[in-house]
Amino acid sequence: FFDVDQTGNTVIYNRNTAQTVKITDYYNLSIANGNTKTLASNSTFHIYNNLTVATGTTLQAVNVNGEGVLTIDGLISNDGTINFRRSGLQYMDVLMTGSGNLITGAGATTAFANLTLNNIAAKTFDITGSVNFYGGNSASRTNVFQNDGGAFSTTVSTLYFIDAASFRLNGTGSVEFYNLTVGNNGNTEVILD
């Protein structure tokens, strides 16, 4: 019997064709070997350590209406593409509870609807690709980048807040961006709470 959320265990989705990622708690989750891996649903689950996406591989939310929360206690290492937001009604909110360098790698894009960082220690990103924020379902929650606890800063990454009526940046910790881009084709405002 293999307990996927037991300390030290890693589950690798490694098929070289499209693949569905089961919604269950993991200790380490690795997405590899190219093609697109799609979450089975937009339901809540937990990664107790790290999420890794390999070069040439895409991890995406399912193309079905639903909103869940993915909690990650470690880091995201993205050398491929991650899209936790398919549309305004199809996405996973992400809560990261670790500290230090939380998103790293050379991936082209890491896309979120809503991201919350919650740790009393300092946090940063050093991914060389873009970190994109798109609108979630504004009827049920506010589009947000939230940093609670210790300071957040970046020295490499560019954060894009793209085409929603408004985004809120808030939390109890300070925030310092290296590069910040707001809007693309629509009128977008960023509100600092």
Image (cartoon, rainbow, N blue to C red):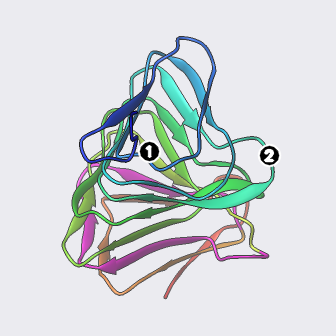
**Crowding at label 2, few (<14), some or many (≥20) Cα neighbours within 10 Å?**
some
Q: Which residues are magenta?
A: 139-164
Residue 143 image-quadrant placement: bottom right
Rendered residue at 38%/47% (across/down): 5
Q: Is residue 188 left or right of residue 149?
A: right
Quarter of the figure with the N terminus:
top left
Rendered residue at 39%/34% (across/down): 2
Q: Nearer the viewer, residue 19 or 8?
A: 8
Q: Nearer the viewer, mark 2 or mark 1?
A: 2
State whether residue 159 is above or below residue 137. Answer: above
Helix, strand or loop at label 2? It is loop
Q: How many marks?
A: 2
Q: Which residue is mark 1?
A: 130
Q: Nearer the viewer, residue 79 or 7?
A: 7
State the image coordinates of residue 66 (x, y, percent, origin top left): 75, 57
Give the Cα distance between marks 2 and 1: 25 Å
State whether residue 182 is above or below residue 191. Answer: above
Q: Is residue 82 left or right of residue 9?
A: right
Q: Is residue 186 left or right of residue 95?
A: right
Instruction: Look at the numbered discs 2 and 1 and tell me whether their residues touch, using CB distance below 8 Å.
Output: no
| Three-letter amino acid code of the residue under disc 2 | Val
State the image coordinates of residue 146 (x, y, percent, origin top left): 45, 75
| Three-letter amino acid code of the residue under disc 1 | Ser
Residue 4 image-quadrant placement: top left
State the image coordinates of residue 26 (x, y, percent, origin top left): 42, 46
Q: Is residue 90 left or right of residue 39?
A: right
Q: Which residue is mark 2?
A: 64
Magenta region includes residue 162 = yes
